[in-house]
Amino acid sequence: MELSSGQIKRLRAEGHRLKLKPVVIIGQKGLSENLHQEIDTALSHHELLKLRIPALDKPGKRALANLICDHHHAVLVETIGSIIVIYRPNKETNRFAPIIAA
């Protein structure tokens, strides 16, 4: 899924407006199958999701974020420190469609 920079900007603003808290926290041991299931469930329910990732260097954080996004067919919206925000629309509810379409 590809989003324009304007759509990503609106999703980032929505994440701040909603005052999202990290729903999934990835520990030092990294990603496991159970953690992938938890991320998938949270994305299906919330669509816009904050994750706390381990303290890594910038390329490591970017690689982990891209791995998560690729595995869950999501889009990386924002990276701030050890927090990433990802988005995957839910075909049934699609609650952020008006924000993306604006």
Image: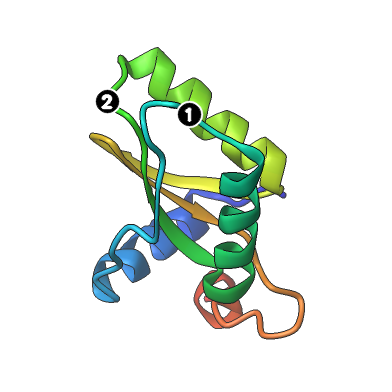
* Image position, residue 57 (x, y; %): 30, 14
Q: Is residue 98 above or below residue 64?
A: below
Q: Residue at x 48, y 29 (%)?
A: 30
Q: Is mark 1 on a helix, strand or loop?
A: loop
Towards the viewer: 58 or 11:
58
Q: In this view, does 59 lie above or below 69?
A: above
Towards the viewer: 13 or 52:
52
Q: Residue at x 51, y 21 (%)?
A: 63
Q: Which residue is drawn at 75% across and 83% down?
A: 92
As shown in the figure, which amino acid type bears the numbered disc 1? Answer: Gly
* Image position, residue 24 (x, y; %): 42, 54
* Image position, residue 80 (x, y; %): 26, 40
Tags 1 and 2 in contact by the CB under 8 Å rule? no
Position of 75 with respect to 24 (left or right) is: right
Position of 94 with respect to 35 (left or right) is: right
> For the residue carrying disc 1, how many other residues have a C-alpha within 10 Å: few (<14), some (14-19), or many (20+)?
few
Q: In which quarter of the image is residue 78?
A: top left
Towards the viewer: 92 or 3:
92
Q: How many labels does the image show?
A: 2
Task: Return the disc, 1 or 2, that comes first in the chain's sequence.
Answer: 1
Q: Quadrant of residue 19?
A: bottom left
Q: Is mark 2 on a helix, strand or loop?
A: loop
> For the residue carrying disc 2, how many other residues have a C-alpha within 10 Å: few (<14), some (14-19), or many (20+)?
few
Please tell me whether mark 1 or mark 2 is closer to you in this view.
1
Q: What is the distance, in whole Å, between disc 1 and disc 2 at their CAs?
A: 11 Å
* Residue 55 numbered tag: 2
Q: Which residue lies furthest to the right in this view?
A: 91
Q: Residue at x 35, y 70 (%)?
A: 14
For disc 1, the marked residue is: 30
Q: Which colour scheme is used?
A: rainbow
As shown in the figure, which amino acid type bears the numbered disc 2? Answer: Ala
* Image position, residue 40 (x, y; %): 64, 58
